[in-house]
Amino acid sequence: MQELDRYSKAEAVAEAMLFAAGDVVSLEDLAMVLTLKYKEVEKVMDRLEARYEAQNGGIMLRRVDKGYQLSTRPELHEDMRVYFEETSTAPLSRAALETLTIIAYNQPITRGGLEIIRGVNSDSVLAKLVERGLVCEKGRSESPGRPMLYGTTELFLKSTGLSSLADLEKYDPGIPAPENTPDEEV
């Protein structure tokens, strides 16, 4: 284990890249960032994989197709199931659905614009939608104070079965689309 104690620069960069990506990182991308040949990258990844295996912790390095990904160990999935099922399957409240619909049809929209349409303070509902990954910040408005603009995410599209925001006109959420819907995203 002595040899595994210190990370090489390449191992540290590869691990940071995998962590930051949160998804599969291709061998090609790793080679580009590490400025190494594929065979050298595979050796770096073998050393990282050995580190995680030796630690027997909650995280492992997986080879996925022609890439790599950090993931939780399968034997721990049951231990985490309760947390992830509760947070990911809890239904949205009526206020959250209303807020999400307004954002979808008026994006990008400021919190103030959202509150004008809803007629109530929307801070907590908006924060919950951001936390759930259905809404994200889309830049800043050019209006005084440069308030944050919000819009829907790819997860919103997946969750509603929409292919793109252009499909919103076909989608009937029960609330008519406002006439001032912008034509493009920020």
Image (cartoon, rainbow, N blue to C red):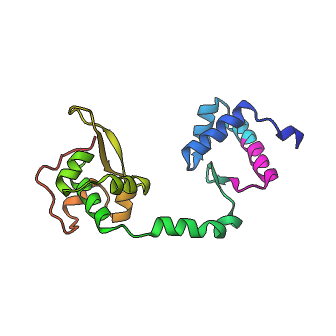
- Please tell me in which quadrant of the rendered image residue 16 appears: top right
Front in this rendered view, residue 182 or 82: 82
Q: Is residue 103 left or right of residue 128?
A: left
Residue 173 locus on image (x, y percent): 23, 67
Q: Is residue 26 left or right of residue 155?
A: right
Identity of the residue furthest to the right in this view: 2
Q: Is residue 39 above or below residue 79?
A: above
Residues shaded magenta: 45-61
Residue 131 locus on image (x, y percent): 43, 54
Residue 111 part of the magenta-drawn span: no
Quadrant the C terminus occupies: top left
Residue 134 in view: no
Residue 52 part of the magenta-drawn span: yes
Residue 104 locus on image (x, y percent): 26, 55
Front in this rendered view, residue 177 or 48: 177
Predominant SS along the magenta part: helix
Q: Residue at x 20, y 47 (%)?
A: 113
- Please tell me in which quadrant of the rendered image residue 74 appears: bottom right
Q: Is residue 6 left or right of residue 9?
A: right
Q: Residue at x 60, y 44 (%)?
A: 19
Identity of the residue furthest to the left in this view: 179
Q: Is residue 155 above or below residue 17?
A: below
Residue 156 in view: yes
Identity of the residue furthest to the front in this view: 121
Q: Is residue 58 left or right of residue 180?
A: right
